[in-house]
Image (cartoon, rainbow, N blue to C red):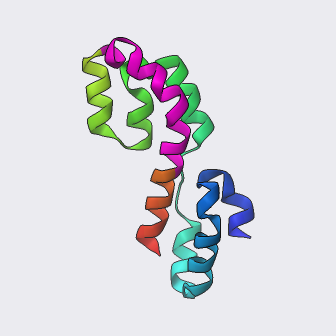
Amino acid sequence: MFIMMNNKYFPESQIPFIRERLLAADESRANMIQTIQYKDPTTALILSVLLGAYGVDRFYIGDNGLGVGKLLTCGGLGIWAIIDWFLIMNSTREKNLARLMTFL
């Protein structure tokens, strides 16, 4: 049920791995996993398109160092901001997977 409700938050290739780890988890961890708040990849993409030059997209997913770098360079003079339009959704899913793995 967890995978059906939250599969958009994780990389598609990692879904079988997540399933195996969830089946092996005990009940107390399963309850903690239900309370984790994941970042939405679509929201990250919208932030990247609208405010990517200021690093808001990277701050949103928790990459504070990259957010400061984008802020100070105005998105790498716009180039970095445009590249992030294509990379930010996968980066968000990877961060969500890392957050889940800390509880598993």
Quadrant including the N terminus: bottom right
Classify residue 17 as left or right of residue 95. right
Q: Residue at x 50, y 55 (%)?
A: 96
- Is the residue 98 above or below the residue 65 in the image? below
The one nearer the camera, 11 or 64, is 11
Q: Position of residue 104 (x, y in %)?
A: 47, 76
How many marks overall? 0
Q: Residue at x 54, y 30 (%)?
A: 86
Q: Which residues are magenta?
A: 74-93
Viewer-proximal residue among 87 and 48: 87
Question: Where does residue 58 sit, x and y in percent of width and height?
Answer: 40, 34
Q: Position of residue 64 (x, y in %)?
A: 30, 38
Location of residue 59 by image quarter: top left
Residue 5 is left or right of residue 22, and the answer is: right
- The question of residue 31 being in magenta is answered with no
Q: Residue at x 27, y 17 (%)?
A: 73
Direction from residue 52 to residue 1 in the image, left or right: right
Q: Position of residue 90 (x, y in %)?
A: 53, 44
Main SS, magenta region, reads: helix
Above or below: residue 47 compared with residue 19: above
- Tell me: residue 74, above or below residue 39: above
| Side (left or right) of 27 relative to 99 | right
State the residue at coordinates (75%, 63%): 4
